[in-house]
Amino acid sequence: CANKTECKAYCDTPSHAEACEAFAAAHGLGAGGSAAARRAEKIKSIEGDGGPGGCAENSKDPTASCKTFCNKEEHIKTCVAYAKEHGLMKGKELEEAEKVVKALEAGARLPPQCRDADSCQEICEEPKDIESARACFDFAEKAGLLPPDVTREKAERMFKAIEEGR
């Protein structure tokens, strides 16, 4: 990240908590008080109760095991509920995760290129082709994740312009 705002956004992503905590510790930043530090402590608590769906049980790396477990579409609901109950997600992050769960329960499908949460975010923030952009838009629309000023009509005009090479 290039500045404080970018670093905060990066470190507010659960999958980046360990890297941010390690960086903070190595540079004497936010000792014990940063969001990443608090999240890292909470993540360690999965060792005590086994984590969502028992993902941490008998694992040499409970955090990685649970990340692998939670990155599977069929476990998203379990993991979001666990994260909410244990304070691992709050605010906008939790709100968006709950919208994803609700959309999946209603039959929405993740874009086919998504392998896990990180790849989905990467694919949808910078789609490589029009098919990816459409799939991401469709899911975001069904999940209620679009900004208020983004409409299907505006998106279709953009998709058409891209397809025409404009």
Image (tube, helix red, strand yellow):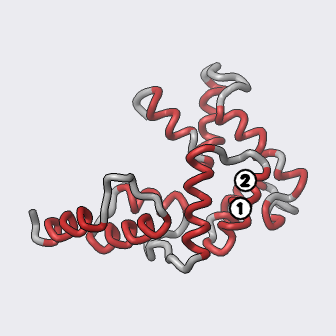
The location of residue 16, given as percent across then percent down, is 59, 44
What residue sits 46% from the left and 70% below the top? 142
> Residue 32 falls in which quadrant of the image?
top right
Of all residues shown, which one is farthest toward the right?
48
Q: Nearer the viewer, residue 165 or 159?
A: 159
Frontmost residue, 166 versus 98: 98
Residue 130 vertical position relative to residue 47 in the rendered view, above or below: below
41 is higher (above) or lower (below) than 165: above
Q: Quadrant of residue 102?
A: bottom right
Tell me if 8 is positioned left or right of 52 in this view: left
Residue type marked 2: Ala
- Amino acid residing under circle 1: Cys
**Callout 1 crowding tier (Cα within 10 Å): few <14, some 14–19, many ≥20:** many
Instruction: Using residue 91 as the reference point, say whether residue 149 is left or right of it.
Output: left
What mark, if any, has residue 39 been given in the picture? Answer: none
Q: Residue at x 78, y 52 (%)?
A: 85
Residue under circle 2?
A: 83
Determine whether label 2 and label 1 are within 8 Å by CB: yes
Q: Position of residue 75 (x, y in %)?
A: 69, 70
Q: Quadrant of the C terminus?
A: bottom left
Please give the name of the residue rendered at 40% of the width and 57% of the height, measured from the top-left corner. 146
What secondary structure is marked by label 1? helix
Residue behind mark 1: 79
